[in-house]
Amino acid sequence: MKTNIALILSILALTNTISLVLLWCFRSWEVSILGLDTFVGIIVAVLALLFTIAIGYQIINTLDINKKISDLIQRQNTIETNYENYLKLAQNLQSGISKSTADIYEAKGQYLEAFVFYNWAFYYAVEAGQPNQSLWLDHLRSVISKISNPIVDYSHKKDEILSGATSIRNTVSYRNFFANEYESILNELWRKMLQLGHEKQNNAYDDN
């Protein structure tokens, strides 16, 4: 912008200089065959040409700036789109890794550990926009039904479950689609823990 202003000022200065030169020449050429009206017309024409060039340059420069701005906006949109795609890819990968870990624990009969990782897998699946949310909820409920023995290191696992639950509650899908069912599953888990002799923890609704 500063360069453009300097250029315009330079053009105006040149215009004034040319005008003065022409006026001086007019005053000196007393025997000129050109009349006063002709000289004035020439001066006006030259000034008009110079101003037209200056305005035209400014218009072209403005169009070029607008094009650059448009390109920058397009690049920004592309970067944002790529970021969202990479983020969804990472979330899908995290969901898959957590599910695989949960499958291993479930196969070993460590069902609360499996619930912990299924819970996190569900969270990452929701963040990635996976459509099969009801299947995740059904699986969480299914794992709870298999828990039958007291849990070792229950307090740590409970903290992990509550941490995952907090993350899930902060999602849009939780508020719009499955809040009641998810809270029902958590309450079912706390009841099962109470039946197994563990100290009763805050239920799902108390943790909201």
Image: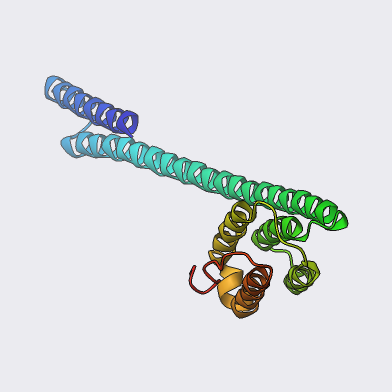
Q: Which of 183/88 is in front?
A: 183
Please, which residue is most extreme toward the top here? Answer: 28
**4 relative to 139, above or below:** above
Q: Residue at x 69, y 52 (%)?
A: 91
Q: Which of 86/30 is in front?
A: 86
**19 relative to 162, above or below:** above
Question: In screen coordinates, is 139 left or right of 177?
Answer: right
Please, which residue is most extreme toward the right here? Answer: 107
Q: Which of 103/63 is in front?
A: 103
| Quarter of the view holding residue 204 | bottom right
Q: Position of residue 174 (x, y in %)?
A: 59, 71
Which quarter of the rendered picture does the N terminus lie within?
Answer: top left
Question: In screen coordinates, is 27 left or right of 191?
Answer: left
Please, which residue is most extreme toward the front here? Answer: 197
Question: In screen coordinates, is 192 left or right of 172?
Answer: right
Q: Which of 200/89 is in front?
A: 200
Q: How many numbered badges does the structure rendering display?
A: 0
Q: Position of residue 187 (x, y in %)?
A: 61, 75
Q: Residue at x 53, y 64 (%)?
A: 170
Q: Position of residue 35 (x, y in %)?
A: 19, 34
**48 relative to 92, above or below:** above
